[in-house]
Image (cartoon, grey):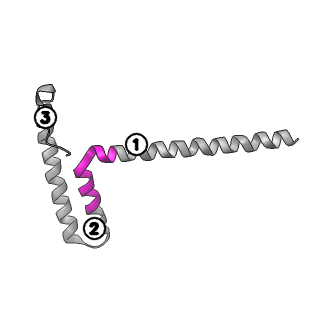
Amino acid sequence: MQFLFWKHRHTTGQGMTEYIIIVALIAIASIGVFNLFGKTSRHQVAAMANGLAGKEAEAIREMGQARKTSGDAKSDANNPRGLATFGQSTGDK
């Protein structure tokens, strides 16, 4: 009887460990995606935070910056990529 109690408790701990690993992987992936989209997403998040805080002027400014960085990223996406242009990167968009 004591063996069955130990087995159940062990699998519960194992399930919790797996859950924590999955949550950690999702968090790491979210951070990676957020950094991949770069300045545009940062400006959009700042605009939302300012909008929720009641700072309309700052929110409008941040949305303008998000539009600008989005346009910069679109124009940069049309540039050729290769070893010949490796040193000519414009940075994080």
Q: Which residue position is annotated with label 1?
A: 29
Q: In this rendering, would 7 be left or right of 53?
A: right
Lower position in the chain sequence, tag 3 or tag 2? 2
Q: Quadrant of the N terminus?
A: top right
Apparent side of residue 31 relative to residue 18 in the rendered image (left or right)? left
The residue under the point 13% across, 42% down is 90
Region of the chain picked out in magenta, as a range: 33-47
* Other residues around mark 2 within 10 Å, as few (<14) / some (14–19) / many (≥20): some
Amino acid type, mark 3: Gly
Q: Which element is circle 1 on?
A: helix
Q: Residues within 10 Å of mark 1 (few under 14, many from 20)?
A: few
Q: Which residue is mark 2?
A: 50
Question: Is the Cβ of the residue at disc 2 closer than 8 Å to that at disc 1?
Answer: no
Local crowd at mark 3 within 10 Å, few (<14), some, or many (≥20)? Answer: few
**Total numbered circles:** 3
What whole-number distance in Å separates the C-alpha atoms at marks 1 and 3? 28 Å
Question: Is 31 above or below relative to 48?
Answer: above
Which comes before the other along the chain, label 2 or label 1?
A: 1
Going by the numbered disc 2, the residue's amino acid type is Asn
Q: Secondary structure at mark 3?
A: helix
Q: Which mark is residue 87?
A: 3
Q: Is residue 89 above or below residue 35?
A: above
